[in-house]
Amino acid sequence: MSNLLKLGFLGGGKMAQAMANGFISAGLTRGENMVASFHPSDTMNIEAFKTFGAETHTENLPVVKQSEIIFISVKPSVVSDVLAAVRPASAGKLFISIAMGVTLRELENSLETNARVIRVMPNTPALVRAGATVYVRGTAATEDDCQVTQTLFKAVGTCEEVTEAMMDPITALSGSGPAYVFVMIEALADGAVRMGLPRDLAYRLASQTVLGSGKLVRETGRHPGQLKDDVTSPAGSTAAGLSHLEQNAFRHAVSGAVETATVRCRQISSK
C-alpha cells in the first residue's frame, strides 16, 4: 500500500477529522492528498479540514473523482441521496462507510456494481488514537481492501473483522460504550469528591484507573473476574465497594444498557 493514499471524505464531522488526523500522524497520507465535502453552512468543519491542508468542496462528486478510497461519513439519513449523486463516478472505487445502521446491501445497491464497499463501526476514542473499530467486507471487497482498512483503522486504535449480524450489538457495546464509561468516570469522581478529594484530582485518577484497567485486561489476556479477585482482599475496602455495586444491580444495569441499545440499533436499522 502506498504511503500517499488519496483519501476522500463524504462529510467531515468529528469522526472524519479524527480519522484524517490519525492517518496523517501514522504517515499513511498527507493533508494535501485528502479531499472532503460539506454542507455549505458547515463552516466550522470546513475550516477544521483545511487545517490539515485538505481540499474542501460543497459538492460530493469531486471527492469521489479525486480519491482512491472514499469514506462515507455523512449522517445515515442522507447516505442514499449522497451516494445517488456520486454513483456515476463510483465504478472501481473503494468506499468505507461509517454510517450507523446502513447495511452493505443498501450501500452496494446505491453504487455501481463494481464499486467495492466495506462497512465499519469506529468509536469516538479514535480522536486520541485509541478507538475500537470493526469492519465487514462487502461482496466485491478484496483481501487488499480489507488489509488497507485494517492498516487505516489501526492507525487510530484497534481493528477487527466481524460479520454484519454482529454490527448492532457492537454499536451498542463499543459505539455507545464510551458514554457508559464517561458516566462511570463521573460517578467514581463524585464519590471521591464526597469523601474529600479535589474534583480535578478525582477526574484524573478516575480516568487513569479506567484506562489502566482496560489495558490490563487486553495485555494480560486474563479474565476480568480474575483481575477483580486480585484486587479484592477478604473483608477489605474493595470487597465492601463491590458488595454495594452488586446490591444496587450495577452488573445488571450495565449489561442491560448494552442490550437496550442493541434493540434500539435494530429498530433504527429496520427503518
Image: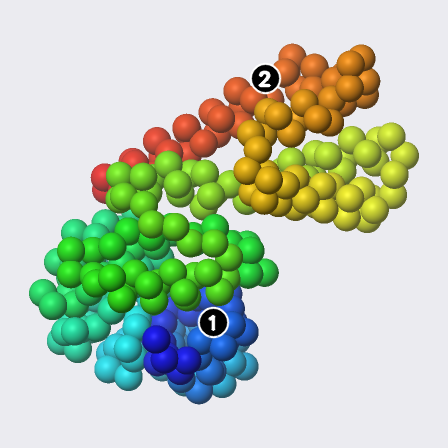
Q: Please tell me which residue is depicted at 14% across the width and 74% down the height of the picture.
A: 91
Q: Residue furthest left?
A: 113
Q: Nearer the viewer, residue 65 or 80?
A: 65
**32 is higher (above) or lower (below) than 42:** below
Q: Quadrant of the N terminus?
A: bottom left
Q: Which residue is mark 2?
A: 249
Specify few, some or many for label 1: CA neighbours under 10 Å numbering under 14, 14-19, or 20 or more: many
Q: Nearer the viewer, residue 62 or 67?
A: 67
Residue 76 shows up from this direction: no
Q: Which residue is mark 1?
A: 23
Q: Please tell me which residue is depicted at 87% across the width and 30% down the height of the picture.
A: 195
Specify few, some or many for label 2: CA neighbours under 10 Å numbering under 14, 14-19, or 20 or more: few
Residue 219 placed where, x, y %? 59, 44
Mark 2 or 1, nearer chain start = 1
- Label 2: state its secondary structure: loop
- Label 1: state its secondary structure: helix
Determine whether, in the image, residue 96 is placed left or right of residue 114. right
